[in-house]
């Protein structure tokens, strides 16, 4: 585990673990189904990942897109590599949609649609909500 994985709640947020990547539920949901695709290991630069990680990233993206399509029926999807605070290579995965989605008694609008996602409008989930959303998403990431 590295610092970025820990920051995003690993292992409590884990949806799928691959050899070089983990797919994590993002505790602050920008839109319903927001994830983090985080590289495992100690690299602090994207270019420092081993070649096998780049090959495996394609499989991870396929898992993400199939899993989120089944769960939230997104219209677009954004992969944001920001790396301003968290040191290890990772992408914020934001499913995008024009109409709000509902889960767990909460409405999840896409505040930035159709422009850039509004990260500051994220809904912070508590530990119980994270566990329930992870459970509801998990079948889509097998």
Image (tube, rainbow, N blue to C red):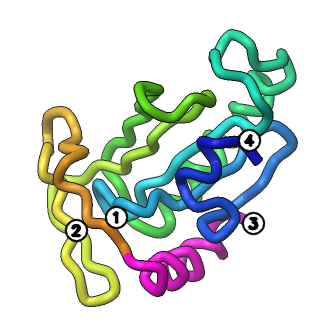
Q: Quadrant of residue 109?
A: bottom left
Residue carrying label 2: 108
Residue 121 location, x and y as percent?
17, 54
Between marks 1 and 3 in the image, the one whose residue lies nearer the viewer? 1
Residue 115 position, x and y percent, is 14, 34
- Residue located at (79% from left, 24% from top): 55
Residue drawn at x 54%, y 54% is: 8
- At a point 86% along the width and 23% down the height, the residue shown is 52
Determine the secondary structure under disc 2: strand
Residue contact at pointers 3 and 4, CB within 8 angstroms? no
- Against 56, residue 123 (above or below) is below
**Residues under numbered marks 1 and 3 in contact, where contact means CB atoms less than 8 Å apart:** no
Q: Is residue 2 above or below residue 45?
A: below
Q: Residue at (22%, 68%) from the top-left corner?
A: 108
Label 1, label 3: how many angstroms apart (C-alpha)? 19 Å
Quarter occupied by residue 61: top right
Q: Which mark is residue 142?
A: 3
Residue 89 as seen in the image, left or right of residue 11: left
Earlier-in-chain disc, 3 versus 4: 4
Q: Measured along the vertical axis of the image, is residue 61 above or below residue 22? A: above
Which residue in the structure is indicated by mark 1? 32
Q: State the image coordinates of residue 123 (x, y, percent, origin top left).
A: 26, 65
Q: Callout 4: few (<14), some (14-19), or many (20+) C-alpha neighbours within 10 Å? A: many
Q: Which residues are magenta?
A: 126-142
| N-term mark: 2 or 3 | 2
Task: Give whichever of discs 4 and 2 has the lower sequence position.
Answer: 4
- Residues packed near mark 3 inside 10 Å, few (<14), some (14 to 19) or many (20 plus): few
Name the chief secondary structure element in magenta.
helix
Identify residue for label 4: 21
* Residues at circles 1 and 4 in contact by the CB criterion of under 8 Å: no
């Amino acid at each position: 585990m590295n610092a970025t994985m820990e920051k995003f709640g690993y292992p409590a947020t884990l949806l799928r673990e691959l050899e070089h990547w983990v797919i994590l539920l993002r505790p602050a949901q920008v839109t319903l189904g927001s994830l983090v695709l985080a590289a495992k290991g100690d690299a602090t630069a994207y270019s420092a990942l081993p070649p096998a990680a780049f090959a495996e990233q394609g499989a991870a993206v396929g898992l993400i897109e199939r899993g989120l399509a089944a769960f939230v029926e997104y219209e677009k999807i954004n992969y944001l590599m920001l790396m301003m605070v968290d040191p290890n290579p990772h992408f914020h995965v934001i499913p995008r949609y024009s109409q709000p989605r509902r889960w767990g008694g909460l409405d999840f609008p896409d505040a930035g649609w159709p422009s850039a996602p509004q990260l500051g409008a994220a809904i912070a989930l508590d530990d119980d909500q994270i566990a329930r959303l992870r459970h509801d998403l998990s079948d889509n990431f097998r």
